[in-house]
Each structure stands twice: as structure tokens, then as C-alpha cells.
Amino acid sequence: MTSSPSVRLAADIGGTFTDIVLETDAGRYTTKVLTTSEAPERGAIAGIDKALNIAGISPTEVDVLIHGTTLATNALIERKGAKTAFLTTEGFRDILEMGFEKRFEHYDVFMDKPTPLVPRPLRRPVRERVSGRGQVLLPLDTDQVREIGRKLKEADVEAIAVGLIHSYAFSDHERV
């Protein structure tokens, strides 16, 4: 029979507040601090220190640390975050705008669609093609990828998402 940890600490970093819960054999301690959006770990550490001090517990006594956050979800909803580019297989540059079939009204040509997270000028097609079975039909043009990388750096892009067609069957091209 396994015993459960005697000291558990949980930190949930939200958009406004960071919640901390410390559970020991002696009881449960909670605290809430402001989230430091420019460096979320600072608010979390401050809240953890506060909870440990209230409980009189040393950080070395913590058996389990559980972390949760809504920061990524909030960034998507609020459209905040790093300036991001998207590399995809040639011919699929506009896949982010095309969307999918699961929409309320299939034939409404006036339907409002959300603005893509990556604007079209930052969506770059790359020459490569893989079949659904993982067979390389067109090898990745690594020279082109390097050139795109240079241009994106000049454009002050902070992050690059890569989504190549059929990469589930052959992921080597995405790893370059």
C-alpha cells in the first residue's frame, strides 16, 4: 500500500491572480497574489513563499508540486503573445483561414470567421511533400527554410510554428 504525500503544493497562474494551495497533515493553507504577467514565475514564487511562511514549512518538505495555468488560453483569446510565423507545406499557406467543416452554417458565404492568429505575410510555404503513408514525395528544401528563417529574423519574429502536411506519418521534415 502506498502512502499519499504529506505536503502537497499547487499553483494556478491565471491572467489576474495566482492561487496557491498548500496541503499538509496539519491542514490546508491558501493564498492569492497578483499575477506578474511579464514574468509569471515571479508571482507564483511569491505566492508559494507566502503559503510556506504561513504554514511554517520549508520548501524542502514539499513532496508534490502541482502547476496549472490559463496563460496560454488567455493569450489566444486576447490575441496577445509572441509575434509568430507559420511554416507549412507549399500549397497550404491559407489552411489557417480555410478552417474546417464543423461550423454552424456550411453554406453561409458571409459568415464571420475569426482572424487567423498568424497573419498571411507571416505564413510561409516550404517546398516539401510527404504522402499520408509517410513516403517522401518531395524532399524538404533546407536552403529555402534557411532563407525563410533569415527573413523572419529580420522581421523580428519571436516564434515559429511548423505544421507540415502528413507530419504524423513522417516527422523528420518538421525537425530540421
Image: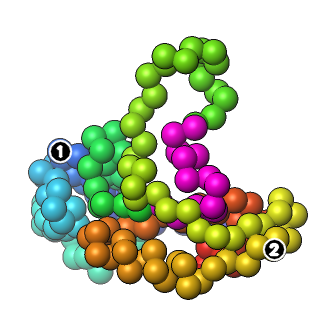
**How many C-alpha atoms fall within 10 Å of the one at disc 1: few (<14), some, or many (≥20)?**
few
For the residue pair 73 and 109, the one nearer the viewer reads as 109
- Pointers 2 and 1 in contact (C-beta within 8 Å): no
Residue that label 1 marks:
16
The amino acid on which the numbered mark 1 sits, given as a three-letter code, is Thr
When the figure is inspected, residue 110 is found, relative to residue 115, above or below; the finding is above
Q: Residues within 10 Å of mark 2 (few under 14, many from 20)?
A: some
Q: Which residues are magenta?
A: 86-98
Q: Quadrant of the N terminus?
A: bottom right
Task: Mark yes or no: residue 14 visible.
Answer: no
Residue 126, image x, y percentages: 59, 68
Q: Position of residue 134 (x, y in %)?
A: 83, 68
Res. 76 image quadrant: top left
Callout 1: SS: loop
Percent position of residue 65, x then y: 38, 66
Q: Residue at x 14, y 58 (%)?
A: 36
Q: Nearer the viewer, residue 46 or 55?
A: 46
| Residue drawn where x is 60% and y is 23% of the image | 103
The residue shown at (45%, 74%) is 148
